[in-house]
Amino acid sequence: MGLYIAEGIAIIALVGIVYLMVRTYPMVREEKNAQQVEKRLAISSDTIYAWDKKILTFLEKGLRKSRVAILKVDHAVSQKLDTVKKKSEAHEKSSAGIFAELEKKIDEEKTDEEDNVVK
């Protein structure tokens, strides 16, 4: 499982590096070869900025959705913890009651034995 996560992170990092290189490539090319730019190979800065805007909006939506999912999971875990806590408290109360009853029985038996010994 950890290997998949590491591979995913590495792939995302490489995609990010390639994205940044492609993003800066038209600006560098326009500066170096302002007069010799070929139309079919050139990517204009406007196109890159449009892609950048689309990617940023997609990332924003994805982050918002992941935040909502994380909050839902957090809420479910909190509810589960509350139910477990209530069950454990009820169990402790019933255990304490059982021990109290056992102590009463032991005390009654001791008093009965003392009464029998005295007679």
Image: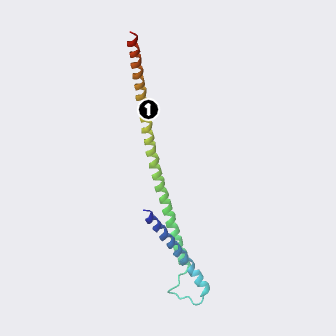
Q: Residue furthest right?
A: 31
Q: Is residue 46 above or below residue 102?
A: below
Compared across the picture, whether 103 is left or right of 25 comes to left
Given residues 119 and 24, the one toward you in this image is 119
- How far from the left and from the top, in percent, is residue 109? 39, 19
Residue 77 visible? The answer is yes
Q: Residue furthest top?
A: 119
- How far from the left and from the top, in percent, is residue 41? 51, 86
Residue at 46% x, 68% y is 7
| Residue position for label 1 | 93
Q: Residue furthest front?
A: 117
- How far from the left and from the top, in percent, is residue 43? 53, 82
- Amino acid carrying label 1: it is Lys
Instruction: Pick the quarter of the image with the C terminus.
Output: top left
Residue at 62% x, 84% y is 31
Could you tell me which secondary element the residue under label 1 belongs to? helix
Q: Is residue 76 above or below residue 28?
A: above
Q: Is residue 75 above or below residue 1?
A: above
Given residues 60 and 28, the one toward you in this image is 28
Please state the total of marks drawn on the protein image: 1
Residue at 52% x, 64% y is 60
- Mark 1 residue crowding within 10 angstroms, few (<14) / some (14–19) / many (20+): few
Q: Residue furthest bottom?
A: 36
Location of residue 104 by image quarter: top left
Instruction: Pick the quarter of the image with the N terminus.
Output: bottom left
